Image (cartoon, rainbow, N blue to C red):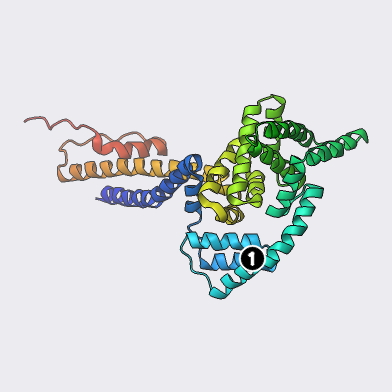
């Protein structure tokens, strides 16, 4: 009877472990599938804890720092998730986005982007892109990096490569009446990200390797993806996607996210970071949950079968007395104890 109670306790413990681990493992598998096929679904799964308090806090902080674009993005994200926000807060965001204020910022940022090539918003990017389309931007970048090299300073090979490629793409853009314009825009964005520190080291290395290997097809596709992100979700989202991407494949995922989320993409990147397009360090935790859930389920089934077999033996005991087994290692004894109900017992000899 004592053995039955121990087996029953073991069944209960393993069952509780399986019940606890299986939902987490299932959620982890959902995240893994979404990370590969649908980044927007991955973002939705990871934003389940995003509520009105979090949205209000982020919008207040954005308005306090004068980041109107980010505040508007969080308003859009709250609207997508059917989160109600205070009316006075929405009015403040709308006031900050008024025409007069936007015009003042736009004029200054356009000039700043045209001259320096380092935009701060859409207007600034328009200035930088205008400079590149007029060849001024690419020549400026080549002269800047060339002068650094001539003075014995370290020049940026990626900027020089993109500037040279940009001159060629600009020529193709004029010749084809704008067909290559997305790649031209993407080249400008990558240079901007590099200069402003928004281009991740891994993505920069990946693009540099592709340029050196003359795999221009993949580079052009990546530049086009960056341009599409900028068109659908804004300049800052394009820069944020390059900050969190490790390779050109991640840029393609960010493009899918921007296509489906639009204005709220900036808020998603602010909240989740790289987790918006990839599992990141969470992949190891997901693997642990899956292995743990599978192990718990297997051992639970073994324990249930062992318990049922022990109950049958207790109800119909054998008349034969077994000899005492020699003492073995604890692991061997545990395995013997678990499998004992399955042993075949010969029938008692007829008298």
Residue 25 percent coordinates (x, y): 43, 46
**What residue does disc 1 label?**
97
Which residue is more in the foreground, 145 or 204? 145
Residue at 36%, 52% (x, y): give it.
16
Q: Is residue 247 visible?
A: no
Residue neighbourhood size for the residue with mark 1, other residues' Cα within 10 Å, grouped as few (<14), some (14–19), many (≥20): some
Q: Left or right of 160: which side holds 68?
A: left
Which residue is more in the foreground, 218 or 4? 218
Q: Provide the secondary structure element on which disc 1 rests.
A: loop
Residue 202 percent coordinates (x, y): 68, 38
Which residue is more in the foreground, 319 or 46? 46
Residue at 74%, 63% (x, y): give it.
104
The total number of labels drawn is 1
Q: In the figure, 60 relative to 315: above or below?
A: below
Q: In the figure, 38 relative to 212: above or below?
A: below
Residue 102 percent coordinates (x, y): 68, 63
Q: Quadrant of residue 299?
A: top left
Q: In the figure, 227 relative to 219: above or below?
A: below
Residue at 62%, 35% (x, y): give it.
179
Which residue is more in the foreground, 322 or 54? 54
Q: Left or right of 223: which side holds 308?
A: left
The quadrant of the rendering that contains the C terminus is top left
Q: In the figure, 230 relative to 108: above or below?
A: above
Residue 169 percent coordinates (x, y): 70, 33
């Amino acid at each position: 009877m004592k053995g039955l109670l121990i087996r029953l306790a073991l069944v209960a413990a393993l069952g509780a472990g399986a019940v606890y681990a299986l939902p987490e493992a299932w959620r982890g598998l959902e995240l893994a599938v979404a990370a590969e096929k649908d980044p927007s679904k991955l973002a939705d799964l990871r934003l389940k804890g995003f509520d009105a308090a979090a949205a209000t806090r982020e919008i207040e902080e954005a308005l306090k720092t004068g980041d109107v674009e980010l505040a508007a993005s969080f308003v859009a994200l709250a609207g997508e998730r059917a989160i109600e926000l205070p009316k006075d807060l929405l009015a403040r965001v709308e006031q900050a986005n008024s025409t007069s204020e936007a015009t003042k910022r736009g004029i200054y940022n356009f000039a700043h982007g045209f001259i320096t090539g380092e935009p701060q918003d859409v207007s600034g990017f328009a200035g930088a892109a205008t400079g590149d389309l007029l060849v001024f931007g690419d020549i400026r970048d080549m002269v800047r990096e060339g002068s650094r090299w001539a003075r014995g300073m370290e020049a940026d090979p990626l900027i020089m490569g993109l500037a040279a490629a940009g001159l060629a793409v600009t020529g193709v853009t004029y010749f084809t009446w704008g067909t290559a314009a997305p790649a031209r825009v993407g080249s400008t964005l990558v240079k901007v990200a590099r200069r402003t520190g928004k281009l991740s080291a891994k993505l920069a290395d990946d693009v540099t390797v592709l340029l050196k290997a003359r795999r221009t097809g993949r580079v052009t596709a990546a530049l086009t993806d960056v341009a599409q992100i900028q068109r659908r979700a804004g300049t800052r989202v394009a820069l944020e996607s390059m900050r969190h991407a490790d390779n050109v494949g991640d840029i393609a995922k960010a493009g899918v996210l921007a296509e489906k989320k639009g204005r709220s993409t900036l808020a998603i990147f602010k909240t989740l970071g790289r987790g918006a397009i990839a599992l990141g360090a969470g992949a190891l935790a997901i693997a642990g949950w899956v292995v743990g859930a599978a192990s718990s389920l297997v051992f639970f089934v073994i324990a249930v079968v062992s318990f049922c077999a022990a109950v049958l033996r207790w109800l119909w005991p054998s008349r034969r007395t077994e000899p005492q087994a020699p003492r073995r290692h604890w692991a061997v004894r545990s395995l013997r104890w678990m499998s004992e109900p399955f042993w075949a017992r010969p029938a008692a000899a007829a008298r």
